[in-house]
Image (cartoon, helix red, strand yellow):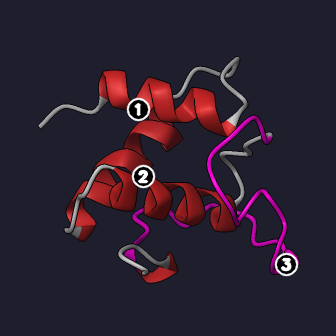
Amino acid sequence: MILFSRRNLHYTDYKWTAYSQNDPRVNGKIDGTVFNRDEGNQVVYLINKLMILWDYRFANTGNKMEKLIHDQLPPEITLQQDVQQWLKANLKF
């Protein structure tokens, strides 16, 4: 299920690398895979996974996640699972 897509992104300064369908950076479960906040496909994937996991249904929630990742995610947080924990602690409504 896709809740958030490239067209929903607020920022336009992402790189867009092609990944194989089963690449863990854009497929599977959130784990210890390295996360690149500058890569649009990884940002969209992570936001979608978290929206499904946390049962968020609106694109504006994805935009809040995107803005946090883009503007505030500390540079030392580089793994998908760590981004998930950081977002959970910092996403306020």
Q: In the rendered structure, which disc, 2 or 3, sits on the residue that comes first in sequence?
A: 3
* Distance in Å between CA atoms under marks 1 and 3: 26 Å
**CB-based contact (under 8 Å), mark 2 and mark 1:** yes
* Distance in Å between CA atoms under marks 2 and 1: 9 Å
Q: In the rendered structure, which disc, 2 or 1, sits on the residue that comes first in sequence?
A: 2
Q: What amino acid type should be assigned to the residue bearing mark 1?
A: Leu
Element class at badge 2: helix
Q: Would you say 52 lies left or right of 12 here?
A: left
Q: Which mark is residue 18?
A: 3
Q: Which mark is residue 87?
A: 1
Q: Which numbered mark, 2 or 1, is in the foreground of this view?
A: 2
User: Please, is residue 56 above or below residue 68 in the view?
Assistant: below
Residue depicted at 70% across the width and 17% down the height? 76
Q: Quadrant of residue 21?
A: bottom right
Q: What amino acid type should be assigned to the residue bearing mark 2?
A: Leu
| Residue range of the region highlighted in magenta in the rendering | 8-33
**CB-based contact (under 8 Å), mark 1 and mark 3:** no
Q: Would you say 7 lies left or right of 59 here?
A: right
Q: Is the magenta stretch mostly helix, strand or loop?
A: loop
x and y, in percent, of residue 3 in the image? 35, 75
Does the magenta-highlighted stretch encompass residue 45? no
Residue indicated by mark 2: 50
For label 1, count other residues whose C-alpha is less than 10 Å away and answer few (under 14), some (14-19) or many (20+). some
